[in-house]
Image (cartoon, rainbow, N blue to C red):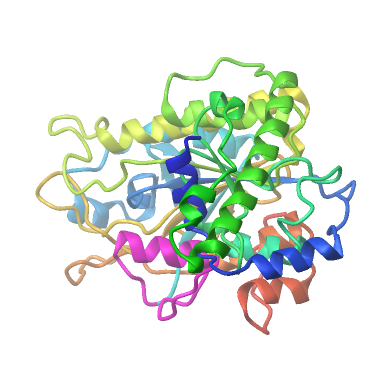
Amino acid sequence: MNRETFIRNALKLGVFGTTNLLTEQLAIGAVSGTLESDNDRILILIQLVGGNDGLNTIIPINFWDQLLFHRENILPNKKDIIIANNDIGFHPSAFSFHNLVQQQKMCVIHGVGYENQNRSHFRSMDIWNTASPSNQYWTSGWLGRYLDVIHPNYPMAYPNKYYPHPLVVSVGNDVAETCQGDIHQFSYALSSFSQLTEKVGENYKEIGALDGNYHSLIDFLSQSSRLTNALSGALHNVLQNGKNHVIYPNTELANQLRMVAQLINGGAKTKVFTVTLGGFDTHAYQVEKDNSKEGNHPHLLRILGDAVTVFLEDLKRSGHHRRILGMIYSEFGRQIKSNKSLGTDHGDAAPVFVFGDELKKQFIGDAPHIPGELPDQSGVKMEIDFKQVYSEILKDWFKLDQPNTNVVFKIDELMPRLGMF
């Protein structure tokens, strides 16, 4: 990671003048605790950037006539749809998802969204990342607040013998906004393994002379660089022991998941990994003009399904598969009616996909109801609040107690359970 990238990510913490607090914590010398033997679990977040068309991924075939009326120019032929049950079928390019569901390694959660849906990419993803109400602006991410609860003294005395590796690894050039805590950013941005042998300079004195007001920021950057270098060295040691047990497809997402698997197989104690797949803002040419079975969106579904399938097989061969839970989500779905450009515009709710070996259900919620007549720009109605999915992951996967789960979501009530686990 070069110095410019490091400073950009460090400044995303939004921390100025926190040196006294950090020094205080260091003096206390507190470390949160040790990993429990039954809580060495890992969460993989796959963000589909742009807004995935859920209706062309999981197709409500019991409303086939209505779908034909609203989006005939982008639907695959009915005979090509992979039938799951009387209500739904998988797009033929989502055959990998169908296989995972059949193997009880994936759960499809229908109609996930939030009240008063915002159709701006930036704002909607901000809501998903922070788990805020749509009319409020929060600066911390839901996983960041979870990590605040578990690691209240971070980053002082980190890494240590109990937590020798980054708590979060974000594969790519940027840290994950969803892992921003109330004060600290927990994620380590990893663009390539070659980065692990690079050092971020720790001497910022030359720019500290600009003005006395910058001293706390310079101290903060110096502390952050020391932490970054320590974590880089620790991950480099992990990498020496890690290997992949399968051959991955030659796609960007598969390469990201290959890196994640190699770190897990090497013994990384990282709790959360984040990866992204872009290209889902399919306003035009979502499918080919003369072959709606092919096109940009079907291609993305194949990339996604192939990468997840190979990743799970890799971890199964290394014996880590029962420690893994993955969630695939996007900032919103697409509108029910397609447009004349062989595409779809920004919508509302969409399915969320959860994968792993510890799931009890393969489908949660009802498939979308598609009426014959629709107001313009109608999206799929929200049936399940995305915070219910998050809450269940924290409580049933990471074993967070109810009071602290309420702290994460800034609520006092219980959220309805989905029964994924």
Q: What is the magenta segment's predominant secondary structure?
A: loop
Is 295 one of the magenta-colored residues?
no
Q: Is residue 80 visible?
A: no
- Residue 165 located left or right of residue 212: right
Residue located at (57% from left, 69% from top): 17
Q: Looking at the picture, does residue 220 appear above or below residue 276?
A: below
Q: Nearer the viewer, residue 375 or 224?
A: 224
Judged left or right of residue 246, residue 41 is: right
Range drawn in magenta: 116-141
Give the image location of residue 364, x and y in percent.
57, 58
Q: Which of 344 and 402 is in front in this view?
A: 402
The residue nearer to you, when weighing 164 against 259, is: 164
Where residue 137 appears, as percent x and y from the top left, is: 44, 76
Q: Is residue 285 visible?
A: yes
Q: Where is residue 296 in the image (x, y as percent from the top left)?
A: 26, 35
Count of marks, rendered view:
0
